[in-house]
Amino acid sequence: MSWESFGPEVLALPWFDSASADSVRGLIDAAPQVSMVVLYQPDMDEATQLREAAVMLDLLAHDEADGLVIGARPTDALKVVEGGLVVGSVDRAELIELSPPAVVKAEALRGALSGSSPEEGCLTSLLARGGRLRWRSSFSSSAGSA
């Protein structure tokens, strides 16, 4: 299995290239047949990402969310800084750290990117414009549903 095996309706892009909304907007606009966008990390285990993405693509086709992401609760201590001084801690209960792959409906991403700044990230653009992402710690196993 490879990223191309998902067919012409799926556009697979390296996660780091998706950091710029401008670059992704051009790729999506050039491929009107694309219905789903997969963001993957080239330097991570490709077989695991392909397996996750295959399950995520199937689930997202029947989900009202705009995208599916894999996340984990942060384990690092997060602090609040004001005027150069540490003044408190961040409550991590409502935070997640994202990890690839992510799968997003192309139509939702097209709409979000049309109003975004060139340097804004894809997922940031989507969320800033009311998009909804469903997360789990894994989609290819039953573990870790949020």
Image (cartoon, grey):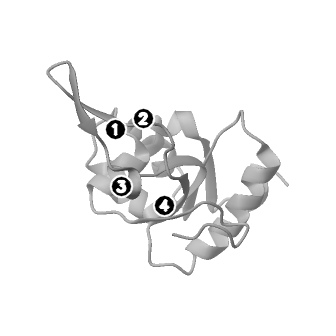
Q: Earlier in the sequence, mark 4 or mark 1?
A: 4
Are circles 2 and 1 on residues that touch, CB within 8 Å? Answer: yes
Q: Which residue is mark 3?
A: 126
Residue at the image point whose x is 56% and y is 72% from the top: 60
Q: Residue furthest bottom?
A: 62
Question: Can see residue 7?
Answer: no
Image vertical order of residue 101 relative to residue 81, above or below: below
10 Å crowding of disc 4: few (<14), some (14-19), many (20+): many
Task: Give the labeled residue for mark 1.
Answer: 120
Q: CA distance from mark 4 to mark 2?
A: 16 Å
| Distance (Cα) linking label 2 and label 1 | 6 Å
Q: Which residue is mark 4?
A: 106
Residue 89: numbered disc: none
Q: In the image, what residue occupies the spot 36% across and 55% down?
A: 126
Choose top left, top right, bottom left or bottom right for residue 136.
bottom right
- Dot 1 falls on a residue whose secondary structure is loop
Q: What amino acid is found at the position of numbered circle 1 in the picture?
A: Glu
In what element is the residue under mark 2? loop
